[in-house]
Image (cartoon, coloured by chain):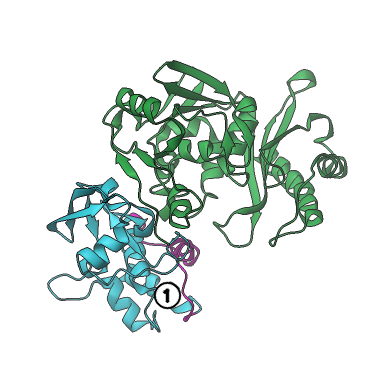
Chain colours: A cyan, B green
Amino acid sequence: MTEAVHDVRLRVNGVPREVNVPARRLLSDVLRHDLQLTGTHVGCEHGVCGACTVLLDGAPVRSCLLFAVAVDGHEVTTVEGLAEDGEMSAVQRAFENCHGLQCGFCTPGFLTTITAGLRENRNPTRAEAREMIAGNLCRCTGYQNIVKAVLEAAGS
Amino acid sequence: MKPAPFEYHRPATVAEAVAVMAELGDTAKVLAGGQSLVPMLSMRLAAPDHLVDINRLAELDYVRVADGAVKVGALARHRDVERRAASAAQPLLGQALRLVAHPTIRNRGTTVGSIVHADPAGELTAVLAVLGGSVRLVSAGGERVVPAADFFLGPLESATRPDELAVEVSFPVAADGASSAFVEVARRHGDYAVCGVAAVVRRGSGKKAEARLALISVAATPLVLDVTMVANSDDALRAYVTGQVEPSGDIHASADYRRHLAGVLAVRAVREAQAA
């Protein structure tokens, strides 16, 4: 039996894209395999680690917990879409300044989560910054410098 | 870690959805937010032949107050429920939702889906149970409203039949003089609760005074306890609650520790609700 495929249209980082995929194709796999946007990382693939977090119509979601076909017609922002005109965004610069990453595997998920988090709360307290990133796992940094980066990005 | 193949259906109306579900019976699962279903599919703990995606049923995207209840449609995401003004009519909703996973999960997960999923650790199951709310189920043959007490049948098992779509959950609004709290202990914030307690108290003398609890993660379904008679003494309340629960142990907590938590958290929840 050949598996049925579906036409899925997405606006990814401002660019209209179209893929033809089976219904079971996860959004994370469409981004990485079909669209070659490998900045979105896949860690646990069951919604726990947060590495695959992207923005769906501006709000952070786990791309490994979405079927691409179910978000047909929507807007997706990946880590590749955060820089503007080749310049790193405030959140990305803050990660560099504060040493908010080491191996970098979890970083795309943190950057997208924090980008949306700061839009919602421009002036987080330290406690709110910790809460903002509580759904993302990092095995290198111990989180201290990521919290610093959130606060620095908020202040910039 | 990839789901098995399935046939995908994307109805545009509730009528279309229930017609498809009537035809497919128990070979189909409903996809709403998917925050519990997709991991189960990816780990192949579930492999339905069909998925009925209800994400286009805009008619079910609402949170409103009507007939003395906060009515939540099946497409309202947890974050919508947290944010929309209507939810303020029942503060226990917000108190519980902040403990449901993380904001990123709440952006997509739905409140109705969480209740239908009937996870023994699901905070919203306790909210529905302690408030005595109800779930509205629609099928091609008609509709019925199931009270919370009859809705949860076992772990991950609700009264929803395969051909029925849960379209709305009703949470009664807070009664005059009532206040509430939700407390839980989890290994990490946002994780499944090792034990959690929803409390609703009502001040007053004689028959008006009331204290009710619903506990999660200590039984197959949310456990509702009327603690009105013991609510004024920490010791009596703790002893009563620990005597009522029969939790099981797992890698996260022994049965004894869960029982201990149930007593401690019951006292904490009642005191917090009384202070609210």
The chain under label 1 reads: A
Residue B92, above or below B255: above
* Residue B246 location, quadrant: top right
Q: Is residue B168 visible?
A: yes
Quadrant in the picture for the N terminus of chain B: bottom left
* Left or right of residue B173, residue B206 in this image: right
Nearer the observer, B249 or B169: B249
Verify whether residue A137 appears in magenta: yes
Compared with B162, B187 (above or below) is: below
Q: Magenta-highlighted stretch: main secondary structure? A: loop
Element marked by disc 1: helix
Residue A27 vs B129, above or below: the answer is below
Q: Is residue A3 magenta?
A: no
In the rendered image, residue B276, in percent from the top left (x then y), is placed at: 63, 39
Q: Nearer the viewer, residue B255 or A79?
A: B255
Which residue is under mark 1? Answer: A146
Q: Residue at x 78, y 30 (%)?
A: B228
Above or below residue B108? Residue B171 is above
The residue drawn where x is 19% and y is 50% is A8
Mark 1 burial class by Cα count in 10 Å: few <14, some 14-19, many 20+: many
Kindly indicate the quadrant of the structure image that contains residue A123: bottom left
Residue B142 place in picture, x, y as percent = 43, 15
| Residue B214 drawn at (x, y percent) | 68, 37
- The residue nearer to you, when weighing A129 against B123, is B123
* Visible residue check, residue A78: no
Point out the residue furthest to the front here. A1
What segment carries the magenta color?
Answer: A120-141
Residue A124 drawn at (x, y percent)? 41, 62
What amino acid type is highlighted by mark number 1? Answer: Ile
Q: Residue at x 77, y 58 (%)?
A: B254
